[in-house]
Amino acid sequence: MDPHTLDGIINLDKPRGKTSFSAVARVRRLTAGRKVGHSGTLDPDASGVLPVFIGRAARLARFITDLPKVYSAVIEFGCATATYDSSGSVTDRGDPSGLTRERIEGALDSFRGPIEQIPPMYSAVKWEGKPLYHLARAGMEIARKPRRVMIYRLSVTQWRNPLLTIEVECGKGTYIRSIAHDLGRALGCPAHLNELTRTRSGPFRIEDAVSLTELEESFARGDWQRYVHPPELAVAHLEIIRVDDAGEEDFLHGRPLSSAGFTAPCGDEYRRVHARDGRFLGVARFSLQEEALWRPVIVFS
């Protein structure tokens, strides 16, 4: 397989201390300058699953971004920081000696399900066109509107005062740093995020991820193909529309598919399209506002 014509997804284990951008840049160099993107930016101090999309597969990245993610997080009680994690300056201190697992478990109840979360000042959320972290670095504090995020699962895996390890399954837009900060406030003891690892992003798991070092070594050996997943894995959660030869011809030329013969959803919906022989052709979108047709939105010729 030629890196110049490569299309696929690499389940990369991003190391701590490296930005997502720099990790993706290294993959771009390995693949001889192919278009490369990623899904779900990780903070430099965070590690774990970072799906990297190569070539035409980059058009499917948004479908992974919308899927739940799982994190293992270590929260340290006793001090809060400006960034809500261990990289920021200390803004408050407190005594964690009175904390118990029972108190913590009780406080965590309010962090499950749909919750309102205020983004940290040190975040990429924009205010009047500028990322908040630019303003924070200039010493400015801006009132932020709370955002609704979804916490599907939150459990304690270890408690050794002052360190609490939790596992969080959440929807997009969730700041685990904010959970650490807000949990400290709820318990009356300042806290910050000490360590963060993303263990799953959609179908990609940390157990199956490849490190940058391993990836570079595989390119040197010439067996790097083993780490490249097919593009359709990004949309494996979507239902399938299987078309005949005439439908394939229409789809590949951008012509809509009639909903006849396919189950029509109640609202707007995406589905993956496969040829009669199983080949992945792309993604179609159904819209009730557009004559009840399945229209091609991403086509792999």
Image: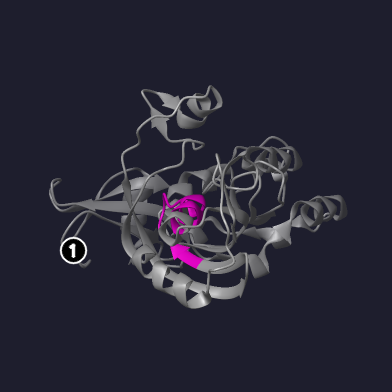
Of the residues shown, which amino acid type is indicated by label 1?
Answer: Ala
Task: Say which residue appears at 63% left-offset and 69% top-offset.
Answer: 161
Q: Nearer the viewer, residue 136 or 299?
A: 136
Compared to 114, does 133 lie above or below?
A: above
Compared to 145, does 159 lie above or below?
A: below
Residue 273 appears in view: yes
Q: Is residue 105 magenta?
A: no
Residue 215 in the image, given as x and y percentages of width and height: 77, 54
Q: Left or right: where does residue 297 sit relative to residue 34?
A: left
Q: Nearer the viewer, residue 235 or 178?
A: 178
Residue 153 in the image, given as x and y percentages of width and height: 42, 70
Residue at the disc numbered 1:
264
Q: Left or right: where does residue 109 sit relative to residue 204?
A: left
Q: Nearer the viewer, residue 167 or 263?
A: 167
Q: Coloured how?
A: one colour
Part of the protein shown in magenta: 168-183
Residue 300 in the image, given as x and y percentages of width and height: 46, 48
Within 10 Å of disc 1 (Cα), the crowding (few <14, some 14-19, many 20+) is some
Q: Is residue 174 magenta?
A: yes
Q: Secondary structure at mark 1?
A: loop
Compared to 203, does 249 lie above or below?
A: above
Q: How many marks?
A: 1
Furthest-bottom residue in this view: 102
Residue 148 in the image, given as x and y percentages of width and height: 31, 51
Task: Say which residue appears at 51% left-offset and 51% top-offset.
Answer: 177
Q: Left or right: where does residue 242 sit relative to residue 123?
A: left
Furthest-right residue in this view: 221
Task: Say which residue appears at 41% left-offset and 30% top-offset.
Answer: 126
Residue 50 appears in view: no
